[in-house]
Image (cartoon, rainbow, N blue to C red):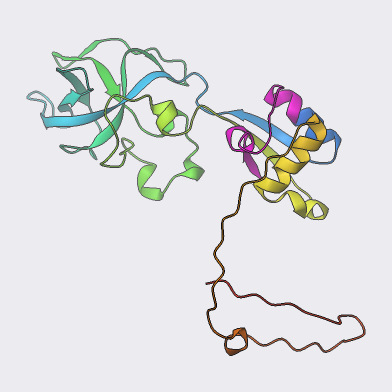
Amino acid sequence: MLASINWLKQYVDIPVTPEVLADKLTRVGLEVEQVIHLGEGLEGVITGKVASIERHPDSDHLWVCQMDLGKGELTQILTGAQNVHKDDMVPVAVVGSHLPNGMTLKAAKMRGLDSNGMLCSAGELGIDSKLLLPEQRDGIFILPADTPIGVDVKDLLGLNDVVLDIDLTANRSDCFNMLGLARETAAVLNQELRLPALDTKDAAGGNVADNAKVEIQCKDLCTRFALRMVK
């Protein structure tokens, strides 16, 4: 099970490092195989909109993009990706930004034209391909059309987070959900558990017996079976 530390913090305070929490959970039978720091090494990458795109005059595979990065003027960036179109919202590694692979972006020339940054794929952002749709795994990572311009990609994509990779055994099915895991986290850290408030509205919706039927065949083992229907 992959558990987000930020998600856990909605239900319980975690005053220790993810590594300490992983050790404490492992000691009580929830073996944490890996502590994954999402977005590690990713700094300065923002969202941008392709204001215009045209072929490089001296290349049959490069595109010249004028990018709106929310700074009032357009930034020219060249790309060899073939899945970028006008008005696309994409992650942009501007000059001076850092990528998880250790790269620091610098201004460059490509076939004689200036390129002041790089349009990024999901892989270049450090996103595991298993978490992506097939069409998102190749080429530039296209963001939703309503994505705001100029915001930090780490905040936008939830990469300011740490994930615990927990190997749960069948006897700990109580932790196959975030609330169960939060309850265990509260116990090992001696913290208060904050359960979410459930606001439900009960209303007569007909006779449950019209939709489901229960027959108790072993009345010595089960004397009553309650049924509630949720629409």
Quadrant of res 206: bottom right
Judged left or right of residue 10, residue 139 is left
Point 39% across, 27% down: residue: 153
Point 43% across, 28% down: residue: 155
Judged left or right of residue 211, residue 149 is left
Q: Which residues are magenta?
A: 1-21
- State the residue in front, 30 or 156: 156
In the image, residue 151 lies at what x, y percent?
A: 33, 25
Residue 19, placed above or below residue 6:
above
In the image, residue 92 lies at what x, y percent?
A: 30, 24
| Count of numbered badges drawn on the protein | 0
Point 34% across, 13% down: residue: 105
Point 74% across, 77% down: residue: 226
Judged left or right of residue 230, residue 223 is right
In the image, residue 154 lies at what x, y percent?
A: 44, 27
Quadrant of res 52: top left
* Residue 18 in sight in this render: yes
- State the residue in front, 76 or 59: 76
Q: Is residue 4 magenta?
A: yes
* Residue 31 in sight in this render: no
Q: Quadrant of the N terminus?
A: top right
